[in-house]
Amino acid sequence: MISFSAFRKFILGAAIVAVPAASYAGVFVSVNIAPPVLPVYTQPLCPGDGYLWTPGYWAYGDAGYYWVPGVWVQPPSVGVLWTPGYWGFVGGAYRWNAGYWGPHVGFYGGVNYGFGFGGVGFEGGYWNGGHFFYNQRVANINVNVIHNTYVRNVTVVNNNYAHTSFNGGPNGVPAHATPGEMQAMHEQHFQPTASQEQFRQQAASNRSQLASVNGGHPSTLAAQTPRDGFGHGNEVNARQGNQQARINQGVRSGQMTPGETRNVENRDASINRQAQADRAANGGRLTGQEKQQINQRQNNVSQSIAADKHNANNDAAAAARNGRTAGSERRQAGRVEEKDRPKR
């Protein structure tokens, strides 16, 4: 019986022969079990200008499927974009096609990874003049820190397969590469960076990321940067991302005024700078005391967000009550006027 490790090496060797040297999108793993559905998660706050989002995905190892969290990473060079890997059902098996960096986004199976990767192409941002511009519709950005942003609605392709994690076969996404994606697949590509590969290895060695252990609900769904690892400040990053999402929702709903938004975002940016400085001084980690201090500051910001929204709700309720009172008075005045009007 051939072991999984030997089988994986065989597949890898076959992929290297079959795929052009300029491309790193080869098939690395082939299994007969479909990957789990994609979990729903919140994107952490972008750590700084120039970071690009790489969505989470299900990888496969000796112990089965495991979740590699979505993470912000620094690309290998200016001007390149990330094409996510994807599982494709071919010849009765699910085969993994690895992700890669390149000048354009290629085919990733039509899988809706979210955050700009809606199935075809990438709508989360673009390069211009050596700078990356972020689409605030899908990217969790603090505009007080990163100013090269824009707002544009995105298109989700294959919306009926919103959480499907593979292409083709039974219940898979029925997508085929477009001419543009085919062209992108033959451009010069770059392998995942060393930090991406190290991050994947960390996920592979963490039992809580195994689908067989977590039932398709990994303990770590996303991280702010690869150096955060697992349990090394991710809870701080996740909370920052959640609070920014609450702020964005408050702005969209009109519950937070521009002044309130600036206040909490400036405080959030200060917390982010503190966390980055603390990590830089401690080899990329936060001490227990530092986590406690940051958590307290985040509690204060969270309370401010809740208070701002609560005040807005109270104002709206008061306006509604006043409107009903005024309306009642107008209706009552109308009845009096009707009563006093002489009959014909």
Image (spheres, helix red, strand yellow):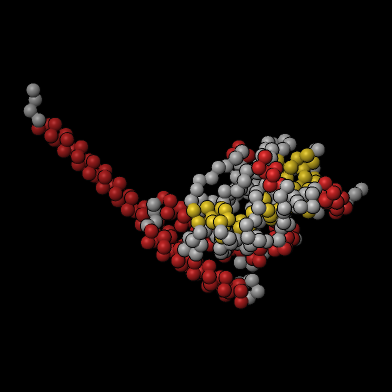
Q: Nearer the viewer, residue 222 or 176?
A: 176
- Residue shown at the point (70%, 43%) measured from the top left: 182
181 and 304: which one is in front? Answer: 181
Give coordinates of residue 186: x percent, y percent. 73, 47
Quadrant housing the C terminus: top left
Does 137 appear above or below 240?
above
Which of 318/174 is in front?
Answer: 174
Q: Report how many numbered discs are placed on residues in the image.
A: 0
Using the image, determine if residue 55 lies above or below residue 88.
Answer: below
Instruction: Residue lying at the far front in this picture: please name it.
Output: 129
Across and down, in percent, residue 315 comes to: 32, 53
Q: Nearer the viewer, residue 304 or 253?
A: 253
Furthest toward the top, the residue is 344
**Can see residue 167?**
yes
Residue 262 horizontal side relative to residue 331, left or right: right
Residue occupying image coordinates x 56% and y 63%: 49
From this viewpoint, is residue 36 visible?
no
